Image (spheres, rainbow, N blue to C red):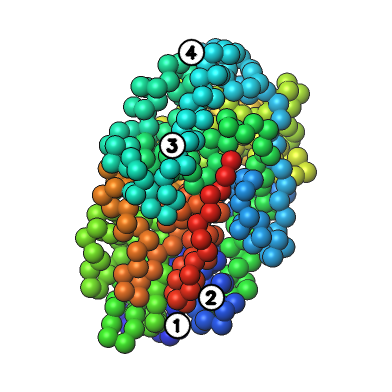
Amino acid sequence: MALNIERSCEVAVVGAGLAGLRAATALAEAGVDTVVVEARARVGGRTCTERLPVGGFIDHGGQWVSAGQPRIEALATGLGVTLFPTWDDGKTVDWRAGRRRTYTGMLADPDPAAEAEVAAAAARLHEMAATVPLDAPWDAPQAADWDGISLHQWLADNVGAPAARAVLARAIEGVFCQGPGRTSLLAALFWAHSGDPLTPFVAPGTAPDRRFDGGAAQLCEAMAARLGGDRVILRVPVAAIEHRQHGMRVLGPQLAVSCRRVIVTVPLPLAARIRYLPALPAARDHLTQRTPMGWIIKVHCTYAERFWREDGLSGQVTTDGGVVSVCADNSPASGSPAILVGFIEGAAARRMAAAPAAERRAAVLADLGRYFGPRAARPEAYYEYLWGDDEFARGAEGGYWTQGIWTAYGPALRAPVGALHWAGTETSPTWYGKMEGAIRSGERAAAEVRGLSAEPVRDPGP
């Protein structure tokens, strides 16, 4: 098929998510001619905001901003996007063994001994994590030993109370807690050093998460607008990247972009689908084969009012059954429309993704009815996004690391290959897997292609 788009520039960026657009805008601000190529019909990557016909919005993808994330706050301020505190005050619902109850605090069953065990284990993990270099976890003094066992094995050996083990695993791993492979202890310690999962246990009373008023995708939409429509090419999946004698070529259906350097920002498993000429080093190829994505179905239900507040509930849940394992009050800053968000994760997501949509909806509403009462099972509208089925994401959060991967292949994660550079939240030493990490990675890659020293890695702290 004949080409109908031929472009030339200094730098081509593959992917119009937070990492790609931040890299492109940083380069454009420095006077570097940059073009972004995106497979989707929209910008945003793993942020995806839907505006509701009744007003308000829902974020199908990334949405929360935590304390200690200055890059995303600075970016939002510069783009005129505001943040508001998430709705999280009130009691948590616990559904266990078919019984519903509510609680406040760390555990559903008040147990000072178990809570003390959580705090002690978190402090010990925090100390261990501090010895893991953020930019080179494979160089940690005990890297080989820690990468050889799973986080769950360490918890089983060092934490007696099952409830204490569960709360720590969930805090550190998040969605990956239900992945098909167990997270290595080294990877878990890196996450703990990179971001904030142990903060509630080692520094209680920290500020709650915040959200973007109007949705997280505004950041990418505003960055793309600043670049200009001719600099962001949509609906073109990149099929090949070539190193040539006098530069690089990025190729897609009816597209060829000639440039000096390329930054690839898509998730690792999708980066592996691009054909590279010449072929990538084997270590990079092997790495991309071994970092599966977290599997999530994210659902939203809208209501006329936040009726769960009448019962003093936060909208949050802990559970040992059902398909919805995590819930939150996802209402906008005004509180209207009232919105509950639920997450179907891991094994449940893999199972329910194959089910008919009506069956999936019925299962979600049955869970919400058990958690929050019959009104929760009768929403005004129901929305869902199957991230595993998204052909340009194949999952959410980021790639996760099972035993042995960091020490065997970690050095290939960010190492440039000729004039080819890597970004994306999975490549960020700090706030790995978060929107903050994506932005940092884009800024680092932009500095790298300009031959500048990236900002030193900083400990995000508690």
Is 8 left, or right, of 200 in this rendering?
left
Q: Residues within 10 Å of mark 3 (few under 14, many from 20)?
A: some
Q: Depth check: give the residue in front, 312 or 399.
A: 399
Amino acid on which disc 2 is placed: Leu
Helix, strand or loop for disc 4 = loop
Q: Residues within 10 Å of mark 2 (few under 14, many from 20)?
A: many
Helix, strand or loop for disc 2 = helix
Q: Depth check: give the residue in front, 219 or 133.
A: 133
- Image vertical order of residue 53 relative to residue 2, above or below: above
Cα distance in 3D space between marks 3 and 1: 43 Å
Is 248 left, or right, of 426 in this rendering?
left
Helix, strand or loop for disc 1 = loop
Q: Depth check: give the residue in front, 340 or 11.
A: 11
- If you read the primary sequence from the N terminus, does the residue marked by circle 4 or circle 1 appear first? 1
Cβ atoms at labels 2 and 1 below 8 Å apart: yes
Amino acid on which disc 3 is placed: Met
Cβ atoms at labels 2 and 4 below 8 Å apart: no
Where does label 4 land, which residue? 97
Which-is-in-front pick, marks 2 and 3? 3
- If you read the primary sequence from the N terminus, does the residue marked by circle 3 or circle 1 appear first? 1
- Can the viewer see residue 327 in this picture? no
Q: Quadrant of the N terminus?
A: bottom left
Which-is-in-front pick, marks 2 and 4? 2
Amino acid on which disc 1 is placed: Glu
Where does label 2 land, which residue? 27
